[in-house]
Image (tube, helix red, strand yellow):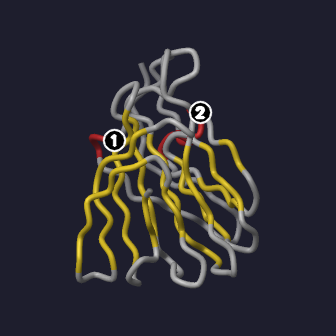
């Protein structure tokens, strides 16, 4: 058995290092550490998008350049529903003249929306919205699958009414 070594992975002229807590490191099914699993996945969204369970852990950069819906995996039987524990984060990267919604059509969201840093609102409903003309850069929504019928939501907006739920 070889002794694990601590070292650097050169990335050319620009080296990128990530800090990871030891309790976050888990071996894959072969007993090997997978460096990819230690890096947060990111993706940009600027049009209608269907998010999958395989994208759990992804931070999505959302743009309001067009009005569109982001559709989460439908809740229900295991074949079509998300695995409890899936997580997604949506961060408003580009503001614009359009609202962007997050839904799956039947999911029930529960949690809180921290509005303009002065009030916290209960978040219950089926559709979350980055509101046109109100949502600000950096506003974010974190979503976690709790079970076959519910997603937990934690949203933060720097403007009153920047993120809504209905």
Q: Residue at x 40, y 49 (%)?
A: 125
Neighbours of disc 2 within 10 Å: few (<14), some (14-19), many (20+): few
Please name whichever residue, 159 or 106, is drawn nearer the observer in this view of the structure.
Answer: 106
Residue 52, image x and y in percent?
A: 62, 35
**Numbered label attached to residue 40:** none
Q: Label 1 belongs to which residue?
A: 24
Residue 44, image x and y in percent?
A: 68, 60
Work out how far the residue at label 1 is from the one at label 2, CA to CA, in angstroms: 19 Å
Q: Residue at x 42, y 41 (%)?
A: 5
Quadrant including the N terminus: top left
Furthest-front residue in view? 166
Q: Residue at x 52, y 66 (%)?
A: 91
Please name whichever residue, 88 or 6, is drawn nearer the observer in this view of the structure.
Answer: 88
Q: Label 2 belongs to which residue?
A: 54
Check the image and report above or below for 110 versus 97.
above
Residue 155, image x and y in percent?
A: 37, 63
Left or right relative to 69: residue 47: right
Residue 161, image x and y in percent?
A: 42, 77
Q: Secondary structure at mark 1?
A: helix
Please name whichever residue, 48 or 9, is drawn nearer the observer in this view of the structure.
Answer: 48
Which mark sits nearer the N-terminus, 1 or 2? Answer: 1
- Foreground tag (1 vs 2): 2
């Amino acid at each position: 058995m070889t002794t694990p070594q601590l070292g650097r992975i050169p990335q050319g002229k620009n080296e990128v290092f990530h800090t990871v807590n030891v309790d976050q490191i888990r071996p894959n099914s072969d007993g090997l550490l997978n460096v990819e699993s230690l890096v947060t996945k990111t993706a940009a969204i600027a049009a209608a998008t269907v998010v999958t369970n395989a994208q759990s852990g992804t931070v999505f950069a959302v743009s309001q350049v067009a009005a569109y819906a982001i559709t989460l995996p439908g809740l229900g039987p295991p074949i079509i529903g998300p695995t409890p524990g899936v997580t997604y984060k949506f961060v408003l990267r580009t503001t614009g003249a359009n609202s962007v919604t997050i839904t799956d059509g039947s999911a029930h969201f529960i949690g809180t929306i921290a509005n303009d840093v002065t009030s916290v609102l209960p978040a219950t409903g089926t559709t979350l919205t980055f509101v046109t003309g109100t949502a600000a850069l950096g506003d974010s929504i974190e979503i976690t699958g709790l079970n076959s019928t519910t997603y937990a939501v934690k949203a933060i907006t720097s403007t009153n009414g920047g993120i809504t739920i209905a």
